Structure formats: C-alpha cells, structure tokens
Amino acid sequence: MENIAAARFMETPACAIPLIGREEVYIDDVTFQIERPTDAEVLLDDPTIRQANVADDYMPYWADIWPAARMMAKVVLREPWPGPAEVLELGCGLGLAGLAALHRGMSVIFSDYDITALRFAERNARLNNFGNFRTLPLDWRFPPDDIKVPVILAADLTYELRNIEPLLALIKKMLRPGGVCLLTDPDRSPAPMLRQQLDEGGFAYSTQFVRAGEPGRERLKGTLYRIRVG
C-alpha cells in the first residue's frame, strides 16, 4: 500500500491531443493497427506537460513508436516461447510490444506511469481484436508488492542514467524466479552503465544484436538484453 500511495502518475490532458491518426505497423509478416497522436511534439506546448516536466522531468514519450519498440515486437514474434505466459510491458506507451505478445497468445499487463498511454494501449489492443490484457498504472520507483510475472518487456527505457537503478530494482522485485526480462536498447549512451549495474547487481544476462525500422526507411541497430535474476 505504501508503494501505491507514494507513486505519482501523469495524465496527458485530452485537449493537448488535437488529432489522432491510425497507421499500420508492419513487424515481419504481421500488421498491427496503431492509433496515436498525429503530432507528438504538439503535446510539449501544453502547460500541464510543461509543469510536469519541471516537477519530475516528465516527457510524453508514449506518443511515438520508437525503434526499440519495433525491435522488441520483432523479438517477441520470433521468440520460441514454451507456452502461454503472463507478460508485463514496462513503459508500454502505445503498446506495440504488448500487441506482439498478445499475437503470440500471451496475456499482457500494459503498464505506464502516464494514464493516457494506458488508454491508448488499451485502445490499440481492442483495435487489433485482442482481449486478454489489463492495464496497470506503474511508477518504476514504487513497484507493487503483489505482482510477479515470468516475462517482462522493456523497450528503450534506459535513455537516462537515472532510470537504470529503479528499473533493475523493479525487475528484481517483479520477475518470478526462472523468468526473463527482455530489454531492447538502441545503444544509447547509458548502455555501459546498464551493463555495469547488471554485473554489480548479480544479474545473469546475455546480449544480442537486433535491428528494426519502418518499411522503406533506415533500419536502426540496437541490443537485446536477456536478463535473469541471479
């Protein structure tokens, strides 16, 4: 209960999103329908978002489809899963990685600390005719005590050094014994610190080269981390 009380959540005002568009996102041979704001940068003009940025360095990152989310979706679609499992997507944003997990027959918990992101993730899951999911407001700094899952998905969450410590603490707390956290990173500058803290924290992990991009555009490189709690 203390974690829930201490957590802080953001909600992007509806008036800050002037237009919502729908696009087809192609991952291998699977097509997902995604609805999102047509111009994510317009959100930065909203006074509520500016205030949240000053208070807690908040940015509405949820409104874009990031390359690492495409990398994660590709990994999830190709992964030799032993069977259905419950998946927690951290910082789900628009929910692309979770949609890939739903396509593979998993049940999904979409989590984010922006309530508006959760609404869009739910909207996109229903748009693609998925129903085996739920949403969870989640501040990484205050993970719940009563949820443990066998699979955690984390796409492009270590874009700032300050994110690494709470993220790894959350993984230790919420990942079941024997479970795996898949983390995709477009090799941002905090990557060496991520690996250092994984080593120092007693995690077992491996890395794998990954690449993804929009059809007809540049395919970006990144790294897939398979993280297990030692």
Image (cartoon, rainbow, N blue to C red):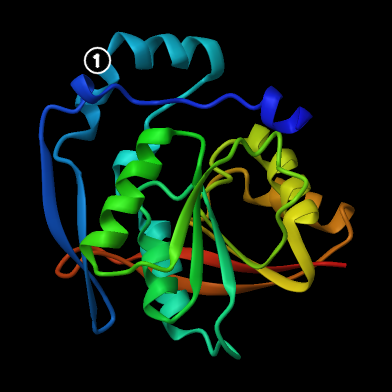
- Residue 221 seen from this side: no
The N terminus sits in image quarter: top right
In the depicted view, which residue is nearer to us: 104 or 75?
Answer: 104
Instruction: Say how many tags the image has.
Output: 1
User: Is residue 83 shown left or right of residue 60?
Assistant: right
Q: Residues within 10 Å of mark 1 (few under 14, many from 20)?
A: few
Rendered position, 94 above or below 60: below
Rendered position, 129 above or below 145: below
| Residue with the mark numbered 1 | 45
- Which residue lies at the image location 27% right of the left edge and 56% below the top edge? 124
Q: Position of residue 61 (x, y in %)?
A: 38, 37
- Which residue lies at the image location 20% right of the left edge and 24% below the top edge? 42
The C terminus sits in image quarter: bottom right
User: Is residue 158 shown left or right of residue 24?
Assistant: right
Residue 216: quarter of image: bottom left
Q: Position of residue 50 (x, y in %)?
A: 37, 12
Task: Assign a secondary structure to mark 1.
Answer: helix
Rendered position, 80 above or below 152: below
In the depicted view, which residue is nearer to us: 104 or 160?
Answer: 104
Amino acid at pointer 1: Asp
- Residue 12 seen from this side: yes
User: Is residue 197 shown left or right of residue 94?
Assistant: right
Q: Position of residue 188 (x, y in %)?
A: 53, 48
- Which residue lies at the image location 66% right of the left edge and 32% below the top edge? 162
- Which residue lies at the image location 36% right of the left edge and 64% below the top edge? 70
Rendered position, 226 above or below 189: below
